[in-house]
Image: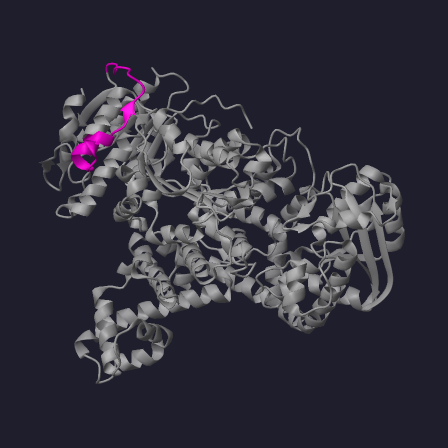
Amino acid sequence: MTTNHWTPDDSQQAIIDLAGGCHLVLAPPGCGKTQILAERVRRAHDRGVDYGDMLCLTFTNRAARGMHDRIQQNVEQAASERVFVGNVHRFCSHYLFENHVVPAETAIIDEDTMVSIMAMYLQEDEQRVLNSHDRRRIYSQIMFFSHFMEELSHGFPREYRQHPDCVTPDDVRVLRMLCQAVGEAFTADKMMDIYEHNDYYTDVAQSPRFDVGLRQAATRTLLKMRYAHAYRAYKEQNNLIDFNDLLILTYASLHDDKGHKRYPWIQVDEVQDLNRLQLAIIHELWASQAADGSNDATLLYLGDEQQAIFSFMGAKLETLTELKGQCREAAHHLHVNHRSPKYLVDMLNRFAVAHLGADPDLLPVPNNEEAPRPGDMQIRDSHDIDCEYQDVARFVRDEACCQQPWETTAVIVNSNTDADRLSATLAQLGVSHFKVSGTDIFTTPQVKVMLAHLSILANEHNFIAWSRLMHGLHVCETEASARNWIRQLRVRAICPTDFLRPTDDTYLQDFIQTYDREEIVVFDTETTGLNVFEDDIIQIAAEKIRQGRSVAKFSVYIETDRPIPERLGDIVNPIIEERRHQNILTHGEALRLFLDFAGNSVLLGHNAEYDYHIMDHNMRRYLPDVDWQQRHPRCFDTLKLMRLLRPDLKAYKLKILLGELHLEGENSHLADDDVNATVSLMAYCHEHGRKLCESQHDYLSTPAMRQRIERFRRAYLTLHDEAVKRMYLRDDSNATPALVSEMQHVEALLKEKGWWRDVPKIDYVYRFLTGDIIDISSEPSLKEQLDHHIMELNTFKEADLCSSTTIPDRVFVSTIHKAKGLEFDHVVVFDVVDGRIPNYYNDGKPYLLAEDARKLYVAMSRAKRQLVVWWSRTKQLSHSERPQRLSRFMECVNDLFS
């Protein structure tokens, strides 16, 4: 928390003070939304709203991080961590796992993995499809159709369906004819029947009852339905969901189960970019009455209709119009632009009135009356676009020489091709710059392998991470074949880390043999907290098991000068009362008694990784002469065993497992009871695990399998084992975070193997994580850094680097969509000609023309001081050239430029 010296203006203060009911705030660029949203969190808590009852949602992860950073400046860090801040998809992921709606081992796939799955069914080369815009579009339509059928099966209202246009008029004619051919009415239920029984209706389409003129169209429709159904089935079989599934499953769960947590205080930023289903989820999440029964529950939307440019993602401007109607009595406006000087604000206001339908009475006013200097507002032109690339690049180079070192310049372009060509021209002129367009650095195969390695260290059961790693390390030829192999392992309760063990036995085989032949000490600890490095153990309980029979029990309570939590979630911590009736031992005395009890036995616990490592660090503090890991090198974990044996389960907490599996025991948060429960769970793992051991042996013993395993070991064993050894090392003297060092180890391995393709600016990723994301002083170990950041690591985009103070480049090239939300001192908007802005193909389509106008508004409003609009006078044709004109959108503001 830092001291906050910000003083809001009157319109900002009015928004900060809003409480109770549903509100819509319209906020043009530069009005200080992020500061307002952060301050509202502090004020709400002052009024009695618990931080855990607050929900802050945005459209992008970048905006969420900005809001979270501001909140941390306003409130204590521990409190700020209890406020959920993130985009809607991230919240849905949190909701689905937290409420056990999906299996705990479910993985979220991206578009590239979707393509890989589809290519497997369509028997196409996935890399060729990824490189083909047309094929990717066809694959996307199949995916959208799969989602549409899911929405239909859940009975979603029409307006909540995300991509209804994936059902074409031809599809509708075919479906109607199929229903007519079987004497049925065309209904949603009948459409589901066709979807679920594709083979039967394919025969119907070839029968005399079906219109022969529609047979070709019927083949296309039924194939689309077949592949959509196969895509859904593949995800279900492998515990996979995609980003649209996150929304569908969350809305369905919230709508059907009113018992899940609702939030009495919600604020939503960038609402104009959300689709109707996302807004429906937010509405379901809002507890319109506060917990105390009052009407103080608050839902606040912030948006700007002039920046609605994401219709291709399902966002519709009509949604914001509808919200304005719903909040007619509670619609508010921010009036002061704190980003740009008067000359830029005046130009944007005039543009907004002329093309965006803005109300002149509600336009923002600047708080900076600075007059433009020569060159601050320019319209420049080139002969044609080839000359324009050269002219713009030289202009940026020459201007950069006169700018202050901290000033930034952005060239904002309309297409990825423009970005690539302009970037190449800047490079030829020796202008260091950062390009934000096209293939994102975080989606390159090399970075994906890095993130897969980190994800595996965080969770060795991550299906998609293993698939990417196996492909990236050339163990499998394609991601599809890698996924197939990982699935074959999963159904046999094998994890790829089994192949990295010092013996040939799998983890399950080792457990079964140990259970049958050796003595196992089942143990559990109760502690003062979850920090394995610093918290104290305050109870140890254990039970010796020999061939399934109990032979001895152990329990001690231990002193501590650290505070003991009074509550564990929603319940009173039972150990506080229990300690009043027990003999309390010193740390050293209790730990030695446990060592004597355990002897040389193998250890076992539930979530044993935590117990094992907090025991290790307590030994280091209180019995420094004992090497815990040397005394007890083997420790089994029933949590890992259950994940191997039952990957279908939705949760693996001990209490839930006891109920789900109907086992004896009680999870009371007292170590004695937890040990008894773990003994029951261990017996279940033994009974069900022994049935799989023979299947494991047969599968792994073939020559082809042994060769693949050996190839995997050669590629990954050293990297993995060294990383595991480093997991719990705390070294805050190292300037490079452990997580970044781990990524660099992957880079070194790929280079050594000859598998590294050049990734320009990879050092920028390292700098960004080091300077902006990871705090070595508070999270020095790899384990801590993974626990805190693995989720967001998989959400970063190149645009996140633009606002980083660690990036040396001061020149940026970005497409309009990726520049949204960013700001730069100097902005050049590239090739603003009729035919591109607005697009030639949008003529006669008022809705798309309006969005083109908003795109230009977004591009120009990125400027904080200087704005240059550039265009080309001619377009080169095959044997001639055609004159062009400056975009018609600029006519209303031409006189404001020099």
Q: Is residue 495 above or below residue 578?
A: below
Location of residue 739 with respect to 865 vertically, above or below: below
Q: In front: 100, or 372? A: 100
In percent of width and height, residue 275 lies at: 33, 50
Q: Nearer the viewer, residue 744 or 76?
A: 76
Q: Residue at x 74, y 68 (%)?
A: 683
Residue at screen point 48% across, 33% down:
43
Magenta stretch holds residue 610: no
The outermost residue toward the bottom is 208
Q: Quadrant of residue 743?
A: top right
State which region is magenta: 351-374
From the viewer's perspective, is residue 787 above or below residue 660? above
Quadrant for the N terminus, please.
top right
Q: Nearer the viewer, residue 151 or 199?
A: 151
- Left or right: 574, with 318 as reference point: right
Q: Is residue 763 visible?
A: no
Whether residue 428 sits left or right of residue 786 in the image: it is: left
| Place of residue 67 in the rendered image (x, y in percent of width and height, measured from the top left) | 46, 35
Q: Locate the C terminus by quadrant.
A: top left
